[in-house]
Amino acid sequence: MLARYRQHHPGSSIATLLFYDLIRESALLILQLIYRMKRVRVKNVPREGAVLLIANHQSFLDPPIVSSAIRHRHTDFLARGGLFKFKPFGWVISKLHASPIKQGAGDAGAMKATIVKMKEGKMMLVFPEGSRTEDGEMHEFQRGIAVLLKRADCTVVPVGIDGAFDAWPRTRRFPRIFTKRIVVCFGEPIESNELMSNGTDSAIETLRSSVSVLVEEAKSLR
């Protein structure tokens, strides 16, 4: 039973696993109370092995929305190196599986860090749009995601989020509370080599189309 629990995040201590679970459950409770968050088909996320979660990016709430929705394993993130300068905060986010990216490292630094996580059998959350949407709509995926798929042997799970933009748009310093429902939908898993079988353009279009369909589903459930 303990060995199975360790599979939630390979390489982490029991204390780190328990701390993450405590924060995740707290975040889930807050999101459900304030935003009535709805989770759809979370079981599509594999229980073990390298997984890449591909999601649209509506707001700063997206990482806690996705990670708190998944209760059977832990999610890793990439964060700006500057966030780790304040040591207490840096300690907390590191225990929540955030990895620092040096300023100026760009896509290459992010890809390298993500590939390392994949090889360790962990699950990474990536936003291929590159930044938060300015208008609430999903924008084009950056081509760097295809390079990542070529080098990371993993299972890819598309994710669609809606409601996070209304709760915390890019133009606001702080989030609104008690807005319309937030919904996160998980799509069917697909292997990275299968995605890349018809080339880079096809892989990007398949992913973007899958996420777009999930976003529309999330909108219909609000």
Image (cartoon, grey):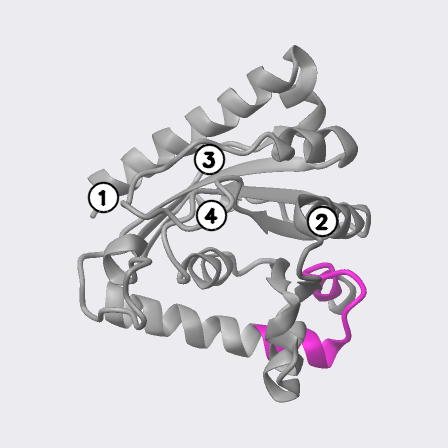
Q: Residue furthest front?
A: 104
Judge the density around disc 4: few (<14), some (14-19), many (≥20) Cα neighbours within 10 Å.
some
* Residue segment shown in magenta: 4-20
Q: Mark 1 sits on what residue?
A: 221
Residue 3, position as x, y percentages in the image: 78, 64
Q: Position of residue 194 (x, y in %)?
A: 67, 20
Q: Label 1 sits on what residue type?
A: Leu
Pinpoint residue 195: horizontal percent, then vertical percent: 63, 22
Q: Identify the mark at residue 114; answer none if there is no mark.
A: 2
| Residue topped by disc 3 | 187
* Above-or-below relation of 147 to 89: above
- The span from disc 3 to disc 2 (Cα, nearest Å) is 21 Å
Q: Pointer 1 and pointer 2: residues touching (CB < 8 Å)?
A: no
- Are circles 1 and 3 on residues that touch, CB within 8 Å? no
Judged by depth in the image, the label closer to the viewer, 3 or 2, is 2
Q: Callout 4, which amino acid?
A: Val
Say if mark 3 contacts mark 2, CB within 8 Å: no
| Three-letter residue code for mark 3 | Gly
| Viewport quadrant of the N terminus | bottom right
Q: Give the CA separation, mark 1 to mark 2.
A: 32 Å
Residue bearing mark 4: 42
Comes first in the chain, label 3 or label 2: 2
